[in-house]
Amino acid sequence: MAWPTWLASPPPLADLVADLRDLIAIPAPPFHEHERAAALRDWLAARGLPAELDQTGNVIVRWGPRTGSGKAFLAHIDTALDVGQVVLREEDGHLFGHGSADNGSGLCVLSHLAVLAWQSGVQPRQPVFFVFNVGEEGLGDLRGARGFVADHRRELDAVIALDGRLGDIVQQGIGSRRLDAGFETLGGHSWSDFGNPSAIHLLAQAIARLGDLALPVSPRTTLNVGVIQGGSAVNAIAREAHCLIDLRS
C-alpha cells in the first residue's frame, strides 16, 4: 500500500524508538494508567492537537466534522503487569521491555499518525477519532474501549485497534470471558483439624479437571487459569482459595 500523498512523510524510526523509550518508562498497569495518559495528552497538545481525557480516563482526539458517523482508531495505554519503571533495551536489532509491543508500539504509531493527520491541513468528510484507551488488559476487560463506544456509538461505523505485533490484521471478533472461581471451607489447623476439607486442595482438583477438558478446535477455543490465590499459613488448612480463568473463542 502506497503512503498517502496528502500526509507528510512518516517520522524516522529513531524518533519512534525514542518516544517508545520515554513512554514505556511510565508505569501503566491496569487501573493505574493516569500518569501515562496525562503524558500522552500533553505530548499531543504540545503539537497542537486538542487532546481530551474522557470520564473513563481515555485520551481522545477528534479530527474532522462534529456531526456524522466515522472511524475510530484505538491503542490501549495499559500494560499487562505492574512491573514499575521499564527500561527499554536493544539487543541484535530487537527492542525489549515490558509493554513495548503490547502496546507501546501501537501507542507510538497511532500518536504520530494523529499528528500527521492533524497537521496535514486536510479535513475529512466524516469524523475520525484517535483514542488512547485505558483498561484493556486483565480485569480491565476493555473498560476504556467499551466506555468510548458507549459514549460515541451513534458516531461510529467502524473501530480499528492497533495492538500487539503490528503487521497482522484481525477482522473477526474473539469472545472473551473472565471468571473468578473459588472455594470456601471451614479450614482449621493442619494437625488438630486434619481431615477438614482444604479450599486449596479442592481448587487444585478443580483446575486439574479444567485442564482435562477437550476444547473445540473449530472454532478455536482456549482456557487458561492465570492466577491462583488462597490460604494463610503453611500450618493452616486453607479456608479460602480462588483462581482467575480466561476463556476465549
Image (cartoon, rainbow, N blue to C red):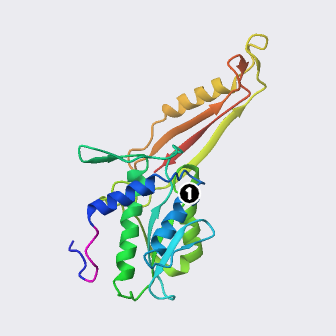
Task: Using residue 151 as the reference point, say whether residue 43 is left or right of it.
Answer: left
Farthest residue in the left direction?
A: 2
Q: Residues within 10 Å of mark 1 (few under 14, many from 20)?
A: many
Q: Is residue 84 visible?
A: yes
Residue that appears at 74% across and 27% down: 239
Highlighted magenta segment, given as a residue range: 6-11
Q: Mark 1 highlights which residue?
A: 33
Closer-to-camera residue (199/141): 141
Farthest residue in the front direction?
A: 46
**Does residue 8 belong to the magenta stretch?**
yes
Badge 1 element: loop
Image location of residue 17, percent across then percent down: 33, 57
Quadrant in the picture for residue 118: bottom left
Task: Using residue 64 as the reference point, say whether residue 84 is left or right of it.
Answer: right
Main secondary-structure element of the magenta-colored stretch: loop
The tally of labels here is 1
Image location of residue 77, percent across then percent down: 49, 59
Task: Using residue 203 as the reference point, say whether residue 61 is left or right of it.
Answer: left
Residue that appears at 36% across and 65% down: 109
**Does residue 97 belong to the magenta stretch?**
no
